[in-house]
Image: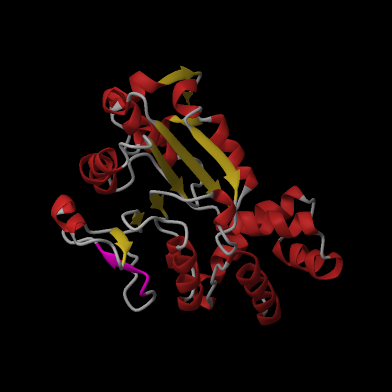
Amino acid sequence: MNVDDFEYIAQLLYQRSGLVITQEKAYLLESRLNPVARKWDLDGFEALIAKMRKEKDEQVIVDVTEAMTTNESFFFRDNRPFEQFKDVVLPHLLETRGGQKKIRIWSAACSSGQEPYTLAMILKEEAAKLAGWTVDIVATDLSTEILGKAKEGLYSQFEVQRGLPITLLMKYFTQEGDKWRISDEIRHMVKFQPFNLLDSPSALGRFDVIFCRNVLIYFDQETKGQVLGRLAQIMPNDGFLYLGGAETVLGISDAFEVIPGQRGIYRLSDTPAELDRKAG
């Protein structure tokens, strides 16, 4: 890959998605974009870049962006965040939202849907506590192709073996050949829609809980700060923001701070102090 081609595609990806590709990760370009080249009947990566430069075909650019920004996901990923959701976050929301009996959750960059479906299964298991409540789960991703897979709710044996307890597999999935389909009752709990984290999320509404895990690691410092600032604008004072284990707000945004004793969960910096007692 020549330097000009690398710089062209790296700049395009940054402008479209905020994704930062360094020279050390150049190998990812060819491995992920060669299938896109085949889709368009082109002879490899170089031909794909040449077509993009010459024709500026929007659908080709979309395919390239989606191929580079689609990341791996699996059910109950890292597990601890979901234990915190069940044992810390949900009890707090049940106590403080008793008047309106409504909770809104956003799974940002949801990929193939395992994260929002994990949340839906947890909520289904806690259905007795949520009787009479409305819970919205909005799941978004930049890639319309991966959202199509998420909406379908059909997973391979390998995908359901990664993190999903066998009891929940038997309870909420049915086998179809060598794949597993999630039940309609879980699938209908999640609303999927395309969204780019570089855009303002205000049209999505306000959220009590935002999962934005393992996303910021792909952005530069400036973009991370901008995304966090926009998330802060659509959260209540006692809302919860989840980031990935390798992510932090420290040195990036003053809008959030760590919830004491709850690694990976953040709150707005002006959150009332009494939340410490409940979350501690």
In the displayed structure, would residue 52 be above or below residue 105?
Answer: below
Q: Can residue 183 be seen in this view?
A: no
Residue 237, x across and y down, in percent: 34, 58
Q: Where is residue 214 in the image (x, y as percent from the top left)?
A: 41, 58
Q: Decide if residue 232 is in sight here.
A: yes
Q: Which of 75 and 46 is in front in this view?
A: 75
Image label count? 0
Q: Main secondary structure of the magenta part?
A: strand
In the image, residue 272 sits, relative to residue 132, either above or below, namely below
Relative to 218, say whether 182 is above or below.
Answer: above
Q: Quadrant of residue 47?
A: bottom right
Horizontal and vertical percent position of residue 132: 36, 25
Res 56 quadrant in image? bottom right
The residue sitting at the bottom extreme is 3
Residue 38, position as x, y percentages in the image: 73, 51
Write down the region rendered in magenta: 254-258
Please tell me which residue lies in front, 100 or 41: 100
* Side of 60 where 94 appears, left or right: left
Q: Which residue is drawn at 44% across and 26% down?
A: 186
Give the quarter of the figure containing the C terminus.
Answer: bottom left
Which one is nearer the viewer's eye here, 107 or 259? 259
- Residue at 51 percent across and 47 percent down: it is 111
- Judge from the rendering whether residue 98 lies leftward or rightward of residue 219; answer left or right: left
The coloring applied to the image is secondary structure
